Image (cartoon, rainbow, N blue to C red):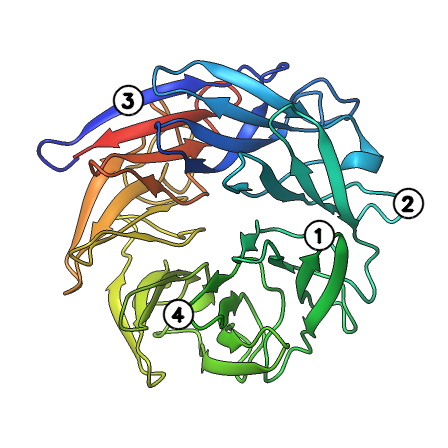
Amino acid sequence: MAQGQTFTTVYTFTGGTDGAFPNGLIQDAAGNLYGTTQEGGTGKCTGNYPGCGVVFKVTKAGKETILYSFPGKWNGVTPWARVISDSGGNLYGTTFWGGGASNDGIVFKVDKTGKETVLHRFTGSPDGAHPYAGLIRDASGDLYGTTGEGGQSDLGTVFKVSKGKLTVLHSFAGSPDGATPYAGLIQDAAGYLYGTTSSGGTYGDGTVFRMTKAGDLTVLYSFAGKPDGQAPNGLVRDAEGNLYSTTSFGGDSDFGTVFKLDTNGVETILHSFAYTDGAYPGAGLVRDAPGNLYGTTADGGKSAKWCNFGCGVVFKVTANGKETTLHFFDFANGANPASGLVRDARGNLYGTLPNNHAAGAIFKITP
């Protein structure tokens, strides 16, 4: 761990009604954290822990409140992504399973009273199936997201939900546009949408794309595997329009990368993971005002008895590409962070762990 960093477990899930296997987080102005879990709760589902997943709130002091517990198939099962919020405190998200006979997932809203509204039930074709990622919301209240499967070629979609109606903006075909968009979208001030596909493109190793709200897609970059990376994750954008993210594989040692894509479509590898400093990042990055990037790797770092490929790390990469490992997981304090981080105004980092001797945890790293 870098000097001065402290690691704290904010909340440990039990796998009961409080949830199990947490996903990514968001934070409100008061410092409360909101998220979802893939299992647990009061619903009637089977898995490592009974239950179909929950939407939760955790205070800075570590007190959890269940905002919604998914009851079963029709109303969604197994959310795999973080939620977003509006100014009224309503939360929006997706589930990977459930929603009806096709079991292809849903788009949902949970209001401040804990009432769920299903905004869309996916059916596979043509609207998409199995959203892996969460949503973004524009100033008009319209929601945008991706499905990792389904659509015309069963390779995923980009969709819009407006006033409860879903429109498919793009159905991926593999080449040259990409396939299996497992990450979500970001939006710039002009309204353009940006995202990644984990496969497909010119070389089959994923793409970065830009899209208008009318659905016109432009491939900004196609990954070729090693050394430029393979299977990119979700993006973050700076004020100049440069895009940053990680790739789960590729790089010098094939353990993944941190990259920058400039406005001319030129990629720069800022860091290639070497296993001892992390391996196989499964999520995107957060960026601070000086341009430092923060993220997690699901594996690598220090070996431990219960982690065959290492337990993962939290890392920092400067704008010049210098990497610092902020925390090594060793299973005793958790393992295998697969989701990204959220950063508060003081520079504290918060994330989730699917493994920590229990059903997962929320952690905090202070600067």
Q: Earlier in the sequence, mark 2 or mark 4?
A: 2
Q: Crowdedness of circle 3 by 10 Å Cα count: few (<14), some, many (20+)?
A: few
Q: Crowdedness of circle 4 by 10 Å Cα count: few (<14), some, many (20+)?
A: many
Q: Earlier in the sequence, mark 4 or mark 1?
A: 1
- Looking at numbered disc 1 in the image, what kind of residue is underneath it? His
| Residue holding disc 4 | 229
Please say whether residue 294 is visible from this viewpoint.
yes
Of residues 159 and 177, the one drawn nearer to the viewer in this rendering: 159
Q: Tell me how far mark 4 sits from mark 1, CA to CA.
A: 25 Å
- Looking at numbered disc 3 in the image, what kind of residue is underneath it? Thr
Secondary structure at badge 3 equals: strand
Q: Tell me how far mark 2 sits from mark 1, CA to CA.
A: 13 Å
- Looking at numbered disc 4 in the image, what kind of residue is underneath it? Gly
CB contact under 8 Å: marks 4 and 1: no
Q: Residue at x 79, y 53 (%)?
A: 122
Q: Judge left or right: residue 188 versus residue 257.
A: right
Secondary structure at badge 2 equals: loop
Secondary structure at badge 4 equals: loop
140 up-or-down from 86: above or below:
below
Q: Tell me how far mark 3 sits from mark 1, CA to CA.
A: 33 Å
Q: Crowdedness of circle 2 by 10 Å Cα count: few (<14), some, many (20+)?
A: few
- Find residue 353 and report its image quarter: top left
Q: Nearer the viewer, mark 4 or mark 3?
A: 3
Q: Nearer the viewer, mark 2 or mark 4?
A: 2
Secondary structure at badge 1 equals: loop
| Residue holding disc 2 | 101
| Residue holding disc 3 | 8
Q: Judge left or right: residue 144 versus residue 75.
A: left
Q: Residue at x 63, y 77 (%)?
A: 214
Please say whether residue 128 is visible from this viewpoint.
no
CB contact under 8 Å: marks 2 and 4: no
Q: Residue at x 23, y 51 (%)?
A: 288
